[in-house]
Amino acid sequence: MKKYIISLFVFIMNVLHCQNVTCIYELKFRPNQNKDSLVTNQFYLDIDGKKSIFRSELERRSDSLIARSNLGLGRGMLFVTDLFAKKDLETKEIQKVIITPTMRTRFFISIDNRLDWKIVNEKQKIGDLYCQKAELDYGGRHWTAWFTDSINLQEGPYIFNGLPGLIVKISDSRLDYDFSLVQLKNVKDNDFFISSSGKKISWVDFQKIMQSYYNDPFYEVKSSGMKYVVGDDKGNVSTLSPKTILNKFQIDMKNKGNNLIESDKALIFK
């Protein structure tokens, strides 16, 4: 297990828990639920006491560029497994953020599920932190979390929060998703640089969007009337036929994008 780089910050966090904080989590993720291969990425949880935002390192940098220049970074086409969430820590509202890959349209899905944690009388030391176990059913998965009350933040990765301390580690029973806290920063200012513009949608709407992309990954561009070209992995204009491109994309959607964290909202593509 990677050494947790947080021991020097514990005493600070007990006093300055309402200040601006950035928690960095490492996620080991299984994109294809039928295979054992894992992908490892870093995610940032930015907190300012009133709100928090959880997103990938790439999405965080992209949002920063958009705020400064209106130009973001490119996004992968398999957006359905993206993990992006924002929380209002005062109203307790939690939203999953969806950003489409071609037009970067933002959608927000309210997470209305009550996070009904069961705190277990079981403890262990993770890195330099003494943690306690908690369990939760969410998104069709059973989750086990380890939180520490020595850090007075009732926060955690993605949509997870509400425990009496910061979540240091959380994973589902299949180990498809395994989040581990690797760094904690007490920062002077936390510029969230995130656009509030977007449309609120339901899970049914999200499934319709997924199906639309499966049917035609360029449907948003086409409906806008914009001209476009399809590039290959090297940035050159693709020489593949539209049918071949569509078939490849649909195979990727089925094989690489079939393991949503909310498995109970997964879609069988038609």
Image: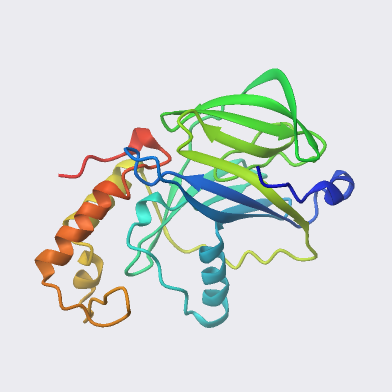
Q: Residue at x 22, y 40 (%)?
A: 268
Q: x and y percent of residue 111 in the render?
A: 48, 40
Q: Residue at x 10, y 72 (%)?
A: 241
Q: x and y percent of residue 227 in the render?
A: 21, 82
Relative height, residue 18 to residue 112 (above, below): below
Q: Nearer the viewer, residue 206 or 74?
A: 74
Q: Is residue 212 left or right of residue 7?
A: left
Residue 65 is drawn in which quadrant? bottom right
Q: Residue at x 49, y 32 (%)?
A: 113
Relative height, residue 51 to residue 59 (above, below): above
Looking at the image, can residue 212 be seen?
no
Q: Is residue 40 left or right of residue 21?
A: left
Relative height, residue 27 to residue 243 (above, below): above
Residue 179 is drawn in which quadrant? top right
Q: Nearer the viewer, residue 179 or 102?
A: 179
Relative height, residue 113 to residue 189 (above, below): above
Residue 33 is drawn in which quadrant? top left
Looking at the image, can residue 7 be seen?
yes
Q: Residue at x 34, y 40 (%)?
A: 35
